[in-house]
Amino acid sequence: MSESTEKLKRVLSVGQCFADHSAIARFLSDHFGATAIAVDSAGQAFEQARRETFALILVNRVFDADGASGLEFIRAIKEDDGLRTIPVMLVSNYEDAQAQAVRAGAVLGFGKAALSHPQASARIEPFLR
C-alpha cells in the first residue's frame, strides 16, 4: 500500500468513549483496512486535522469527555476554510440529530447500534475505498 493510499485510510474519531471508539476502530480496520485516531475534544480535533490528513471525521453527538455538542463541532469545522472539505459524519442513533448534522454540512452518518448493519458500511465506503 502506498503512502498516499495509507493516508486516505485514516479516520479521525472525535468525542467517543473508549468502548465506542474501540468498536468503531475495529469495524473500520476489519471492513476497510482503515486506522482510527481518537481525540476527546474539538480543540484536539482541529489540531489533529490541521496536522494530518484524514479521509473522514466521525463525530459523536455528545462528546464523552466534556459533554460538548458534536453538532456544534460539525458547524465549526464546516466554517473553517482549511478543513471544510474533509467529509464529516455524525455517530448517533437519533434520526433528528442525523438530519441536523446533514443540514450543518455533514454527510449522512450512522448510529453505534448500526455498526454491524450493512448500512454503516455503505455510508462509510465511499470515503475509504
Image (spheres, rainbow, N blue to C red):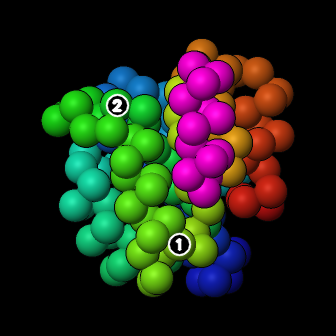
Q: Label 1 sits on what residue type?
A: Arg
Q: Earlier in the sequence, mark 2 or mark 1?
A: 2
* Secondary structure of the residue carrying numbered label 1: loop
State yes or no: discs 2 and 1 in contact (Cβ < 8 Å): no
Instruction: Give the side of residue 123 with respect to residue 34, left or right.
Output: right
Residue 62: mark in rendering: 2
Residue located at (24% from left, 50% from top): 41
Q: Nearer the viewer, residue 6 or 67?
A: 67
Q: Nearer the viewer, residue 97 or 22?
A: 97
Q: Which quarter of the figure is the N terminus placed in?
A: bottom right
The alpha-carbon separation of the residues under discs 2 and 1 comes to: 21 Å
Name the residue that disc number 1 marks: 84
Q: Residue at x 27, y 55 (%)?
A: 42
Is residue 80 placed above or below 39 in the rendered structure? below
In the rendering, which numbered label is found on residue 19? none
Type of secondary structure dominating the magenta stretch:
helix
Residue 47 figure quarter: bottom left
Amino acid type at mark 2: Val
Left/right placement of residue 75 relative to residue 46 reads right
Image: 19 above or below 13: above
Closest to the observer: 107 or 6?
107
Q: Is residue 95 visible?
A: yes
- Position of the C terminus, as image quadrant, is bottom right
Looking at the rendering, the stretch of residues picked out in magenta corresponds to 94-106
Task: Residue at 51% x, 56% y: name it.
Answer: 57
- Could you say where residue 124 lies in the image, as x and y percent from the top left? 72, 47
In the image, residue 105 lies in the stretch drawn in magenta: yes
Q: Is residue 82 magenta?
A: no
Image location of residue 28, percent across then percent down: 61, 44
Residue 37 horizontal/vertical position (percent):
40, 54
